[in-house]
Image (spheres, rainbow, N blue to C red):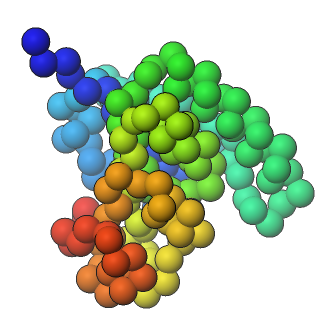
Amino acid sequence: MNKQKKICFAASTGGHYEQLLMLRPLMEKYDSFILTEETLYKTQVKGVRMYCLKQVNRREKSMLPNMLRNAFTSLGIFLKERPDVVICTGVLAMIPMCLLAKLFGKKLIYIESFAKVTSPTETGKLLYRFADQFYVQWPQMKQIYPKAIYLGGIY
């Protein structure tokens, strides 16, 4: 019997989350859940469980405590859901879930931001070395990420 894969779709709010929603057909095809940041703006995907993390801004003093809190929250979600794959469009708050996937021997797929045409994101630079598949949405980004896969934009 072929076990259906469970997929975690992870993205911060805003444009990263909008890009993630472009993968809705995959969310509907597999046992999926979404991991995003807690904000006033809520977008539910029908039939897909959603978990929220604390927003993280690298320029704020609360960055380290929020990242630590998110790491523990992500661990709890990971142990509850046990995803086989994490698909991430960034950014900072999603790093713990991505690293947990690798720590537990699961697959990590990272999609670099559509907005990044000639320079990398900080999260992309970090997760490039861990990702099983790393996608860029602009051909010139292959100069920055030589092992990346370019298939065009997800829009």
Residue 64: x and y in percent read 82, 50
Q: Residue at x 53, y 37 (%)?
A: 103
Taking the spot 41% from the left edge, 66% from the top edge, the residue there is: 112
Residue 147 visible in this rendered orientation of the protein: yes
Residue 17 showing in the rendered view: no
Q: Would you identify the image quadrant in which residue 131 lies?
A: bottom left
> Which quarter of the picture shows residue 46?
top left
Q: Image point 63% across, 48% down: which residue?
A: 93
When the figure is inspected, residue 46 is found, relative to residue 151, above or below; the finding is: above
Q: Residue furthest left?
A: 1
Say whether residue 49 is left or right of residue 133.
right
126 sits left or right of 55 in the view: left
Compare residues 99 and 153 and report the one nearer the observer.
Answer: 99
Nearer to me, 18 or 116: 116
Q: Which quarter of the figure is the C terminus placed in?
A: bottom left
* Residue 81: percent from left, percent from top: 45, 20
Name above or below for residue 45 compared with residue 3. Answer: below
Point 46% across, 63% down: residue: 128
